[in-house]
Amino acid sequence: TRSCGLFLSDSLTFEALESQVSQGTFTPLSPSLVLKQPILSLSPIAAQRFSWGQKLPESDYPDGWVQVRDNCDRFLGIGEIREGLLRPKVVLPLE
């Protein structure tokens, strides 16, 4: 079973999740998921708005999932472009 490029066989059981969290090895995003997505770089103002969860106009990319980075190449999260709007889906906190 596949959804958005993810396979059910790659999911974690609750026991595995609990074990990873207790060992400090859990990562909420698989690097392989992120690396498959095109990179969208945002200006500082747009990056701030993305980090607040705001939708942003985006007409240069086709509909689909993107990894979002700021102009210093810091990973900000995952967004979905749909109907000309970048919609934040996973947002990492700014430091």
Image (tube, rainbow, N blue to C red):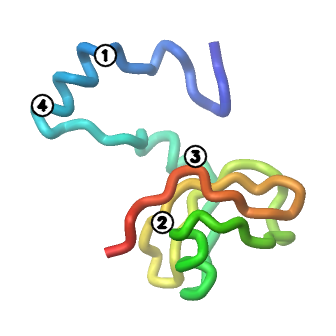
Of mark 3 and mark 4, the one earlier in the sequence is 4
Percent position (x, y) of residue 80? 70, 52
Of mark 4 and mark 2, the one earlier in the sequence is 4
Of mark 1 and mark 2, the one earlier in the sequence is 1
Task: Decide if residue 93 is on the left or right side of residue 61.
Answer: left
Task: Decide if residue 18 is on the left or right side of residue 28.
Answer: left
Q: Is residue 10 above or below residue 23?
A: above
For the N terminus, give its image quadrant: top right
Check the image and name the residue furthest to the bottom: 44
Query: Where does label 2 land, which residue?
Result: 76
> Mark on residue 22?
4
Task: Decide if residue 79 is on the left or right side of residue 76.
Answer: right
**Alpha-carbon neighbours of circle 4 within 10 Å: few (<14), some, or many (≥20)?**
few
**Alpha-carbon neighbours of circle 3 within 10 Å: few (<14), some, or many (≥20)?**
few
* Residue type, numbered disc 4: Ser
In this view, the residue in front, 31 or 78, is 78
Percent position (x, y) of residue 4? 66, 33
Label pair 3/1, CB-CB below 8 angstroms: no
Percent position (x, y) of residue 9? 48, 13
Mark 1 and mark 4: Cα distance apart in space: 12 Å
In this view, the residue in front, 21 or 73, is 21
